[in-house]
Image (cartoon, helix red, strand yellow):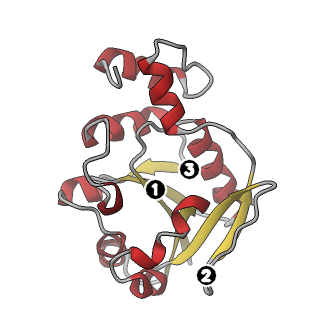
Amino acid sequence: MTRIGILGGTFDTPHVGHLLAASDAFEALALDRLYFVPAAEQPLKAGLAAAAAHHRAAMVERLIDGDPRFAVDPIEMERGGLSYTVDTLRALRTRWPGDVALFLLLGRDVVATLPKWREPDAVMELAQVVVLTRVGESAKVPEGVRALTTRRVDVSSTEVRTRVREGKSIRGFVPDAVADYIAAADLYR
């Protein structure tokens, strides 16, 4: 059986915390591949992304920088409009029929919104939902959801955007290739 992880999000900006959590999940779940899926537009964050989807996808490409464990899947950007996880999982099930186990990776902060998602029961039928918690955090997870503890990395996309806006360095928060992209594209100013 092929084991595939799906890590969706706005990735506005992608940072080392995303990369390390993905690495931890890849190993703990014995995944064959992990796909980062940048949202075209998240329904619960509609209109709040600071960078356009193509910029966010380009930054994720630079974040994973050729790591063979990871890939970027533009499925939600190609579909356009609001990005509903249930639609994405259905499309991936069509793409990968047969003996494929899908693991939908969510941050602890996101799992609380799961009941507000479109067809949350279908989401849980289409993939094993795995909540990534940081060492030292407690996670109350719904029935049928698995919790996975990952290392604690105290960095957030909001902090990275704020640092850029304030003219502060983001080296160490993001890989150099992501920092260079942000500067070249003049993002978050």
The label nearer to you, 1 versus 3, is 1
In the structure shown, which secondary structural element does the residue marked by tag 1 occupy? Answer: strand
Tell me, for residue 142, which label it has, or none. 2
The residue wearing badge 1 is 35
Q: Which residue is drawn at the image coordinates 37% and 73% (left, top)?
A: 89
Question: Does residue 32 appear to the left or right of 94 in the view shown?
Answer: right
Asked if the residue at tag 3 contacts the one at tag 2, i.e. Cβ–Cβ closer than 8 Å, the answer is no
Residue 122, above or below 48: below
Nearer to the camera, 39 or 24: 39
Which quadrant of the rendered structure holds the C terminus? top left
> Which of pointers 1 and 2 lies earlier in the amino acid sequence?
1
Q: Where is residue 163 in the image (x, y as percent from the top left)?
A: 50, 21
Q: Position of residue 26 (x, y in %)?
A: 63, 57
Element assignment for label 2:
loop
On the image, numbered disc 3 is attached to which residue? 69
**Residue farthest to the right?**
136
What is the CA distance from the residue labelled 1 to the residue labelled 2? 24 Å
Kind of residue indicated by mark 2: Pro
Residue 126 seen anywhere in this rendered image of the structure: yes
Amino acid type for the residue under numbered disc 3: Arg
Q: In this view, does 171 lie above or below 150?
A: above
Q: Where is residue 167 in the image (x, y as percent from the top left)?
A: 46, 12
